[in-house]
Image (cartoon, helix red, strand yellow):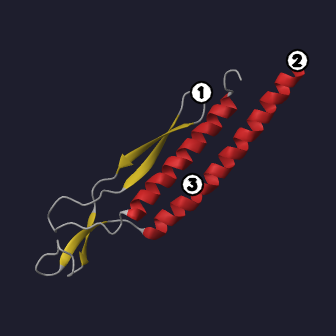
Amino acid sequence: MGAMTSAQVTAIGGLNAATLTLDASASNLANADDVSAVGGPPAYNPVAVQQSARPGGGVIATAVTLKPSQLLAYDPNSPVANAAGLVQAPEIDPVSEVTNQLVAGQNFAYSLTALKAANEEQQALLDMTT
């Protein structure tokens, strides 16, 4: 197969962005219960995905660490709890993360459909030239 069309590049960028978004959200949810001592370094810093336009079409997706934001939580049984039973936990909203995962799944499906259509169009053009 020859060079990719702009439609294929755009669709593949969308697939990559959706996959990275799902990975970032899954990481946030998997580490939402990581705690650390109050005042110490965070046990986990949430991540997000930033997208920017790719010259020629599509997007470039990059995972970035969000500004550390910790919440105080009461967990007197934690080995890192202070005398008041408090620990710090990453500020992660499970509802937002599940929403991010659902949107990423939809974006992946749309991008896959676009890639299939672009591939079929390219194959049809190749068939016409042979």
As drawn, the label of residue 104 is 3
At x 36%, y 66%, the residue is 32
Using a 10 Å C-alpha cutoff, classify the residue at mark 1 as few (fewer than 14 neighbours), some (14 to 19) or many (20 or more): few
Disc 3 to disc 1, C-alpha distance: 23 Å
**Which mark identifies residue 56?**
1
Q: Amino acid at mark 3?
A: Ala
Circle 3 Cα neighbour tier, 10 Å, few/some/many (<14 / 14–19 / ≥20): many
Residue at image point 74% right, 35% down: 118
Badge 1 marks a residue whose secondary structure is loop
Q: Earlier in the sequence, mark 2 or mark 1?
A: 1
Q: Measuring 71% from the left and 23% from the top, which residue is drawn there?
A: 1
Q: CA distance from mark 3 to mark 2?
A: 39 Å
- On the image, the x and y values in percent for residue 106 come to 63, 55
- Asked if residue 79 lies left or right of residue 6, the reply is left
Q: Earlier in the sequence, mark 3 or mark 1?
A: 1
Q: Nearer the viewer, residue 57 or 115?
A: 115
Q: Where is 106 relative to 71, above or below?
A: above
Nearer the camera: disc 3 or disc 2: 2
Residue 130, disc: 2
Question: Outermost residue toward the top?
Answer: 130
Pick whichever of labels 3 and 2 is earlier in the sequence: 3
